């Protein structure tokens, strides 16, 4: 794993955005795996800024998002569809039919997971996957205990993940109990992974990821230790225990 230390959140966001932009410039038809949560917001802001200033084009990029809450329609402001639209898609030129996010409002969730896996396969897999990390080491919504063999699947969110994400909702009761997420298997098949982390709250998870050589389903991010092209960009606070 290559570790790049950033001074702070702003620096991390700029470095992560530059990393992605360089990739897009070198491979304009990139299959780009995208993530949600608080951490990537700054990265997307820099990408939008760069799009306006430097005209980096995304017209041939295909994007594949990691996850979506179950039961929230794409129009729901708390859905990851809305998050992606507001933070990135409405500002850059990636065509609508090349943006992909699991549909958490599908009637048949199992069929939706299959559709998503087939879609990723038909794109030839993900070239560059952006990841955040949960306090408990979850990536995407793969909670501790999830088999590393799974592809897109339905998960029940842990109380701690729902609590952490409650800040985006009015109350914790509004946070959906389930989500669809790309599995570790698909994430591991990405050609390159860029994981970003910021703040003291992530320091223990980063310590476990970087310093412990124990690959275990109890700590989903540990799967990344087996991947040959992982870049971590994290700020000083997130790396303070590593
Ligand atoms: C959610 C997302 C993850 C994200 C995690 C951490 O659970 N599904 O993809 O990495 O939150 O989010 P944050 O960046 O807000 O700490």
Image: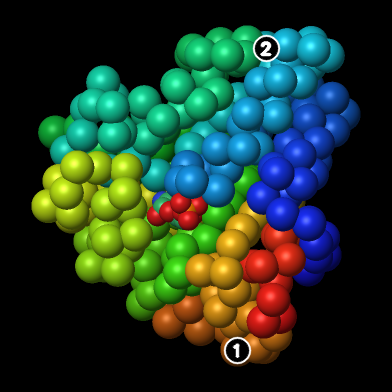
Give the distance between the C-alpha atoms of the residues marked 1 and 2, in whole angstroms: 41 Å
**Mark earlier in primary sequence (1, 2):** 2
Compare residues 173 and 89 and report the one nearer the observer. Answer: 173
Is 85 left, or right, of 41 in this rendering? left
Quadrant of the drawing holding the C terminus? bottom right
Residue highlighted by disc 1? 214
Q: Give the residue at x 57% y 14%.
A: 91
The vertical placement of 16 against 48, above or below, is below
- Give the secondary structure at mark 1: loop
Task: Tell me the tag on residue 72.
Answer: none
Q: Give the residue at x 70% y 85%.
A: 211
Q: Point out residue 64 in the picture as x, y percentages from the top left corner.
A: 52, 34
Q: Point out residue 70 in the picture as x, y percentages from the top left corner.
A: 22, 43
Q: Is mark 1 within 8 Å of ligand 1?
A: no
The vertical placement of 56 against 5, above or below, is above
Q: Give the residue at x 25% y 37%.
A: 104
Residue 124: name its quadrant: top right
Q: Give the residue at x 59% y 62%.
A: 199
Q: Is mark 2 within 8 Å of ligand 1?
A: no
Q: Are marks 1 and 2 in contact (CB under 8 Å)?
A: no
The image's colouring method is rainbow
Task: Tell me the tag on residue 59.
Answer: 2
The vertical placement of 133 against 67, above or below, is below
Residue 56: name its quadrant: top right
Residue 195: name its quadrant: bottom right
Is 123 left, or right, of 86 in this rendering? right
């Amino acid at each position: 794993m290559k570790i790049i230390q950033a001074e702070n959140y702003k620096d991390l966001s700029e470095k992560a955005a530059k990393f992605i932009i360089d990739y897009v410039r070198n491979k304009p038809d990139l299959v780009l795996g995208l993530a949600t949560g608080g951490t990537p917001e700054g990265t997307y802001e820099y990408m939008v800024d760069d799009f306006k200033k430097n005209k980096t084009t995304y017209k041939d990029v295909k994007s594949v998002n990691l996850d979506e809450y179950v039961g929230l329609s794409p129009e729901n402001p708390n859905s990851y569809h809305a998050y992606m639209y507001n933070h990135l898609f409405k500002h850059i030129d990636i065509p609508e039919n090349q943006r992909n996010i699991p549909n958490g409002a599908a009637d048949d969730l199992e069929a939706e997971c299959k559709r998503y896996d087939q879609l990723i396969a038909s794109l030839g897999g993900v070239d560059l996957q952006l990841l955040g990390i949960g306090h408990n080491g979850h990536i995407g919504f793969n909670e501790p205990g999830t088999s590393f063999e799974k592809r897109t699947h339905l998960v029940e969110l842990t109380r701690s993940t729902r609590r952490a994400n409650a800040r985006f909702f009015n109350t914790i009761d509004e946070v959906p109990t389930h989500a669809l997420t790309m599995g570790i298997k698909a994430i591991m098949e990405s050609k390159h992974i860029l994981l970003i982390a910021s703040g003291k709250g992530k320091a223990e998870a980063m310590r476990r990821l970087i310093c412990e050589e124990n690959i275990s389903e109890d700590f989903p991010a540990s799967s990344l230790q087996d991947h040959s092209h992982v870049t971590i960009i994290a700020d000083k606070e997130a790396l303070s225990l590593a």
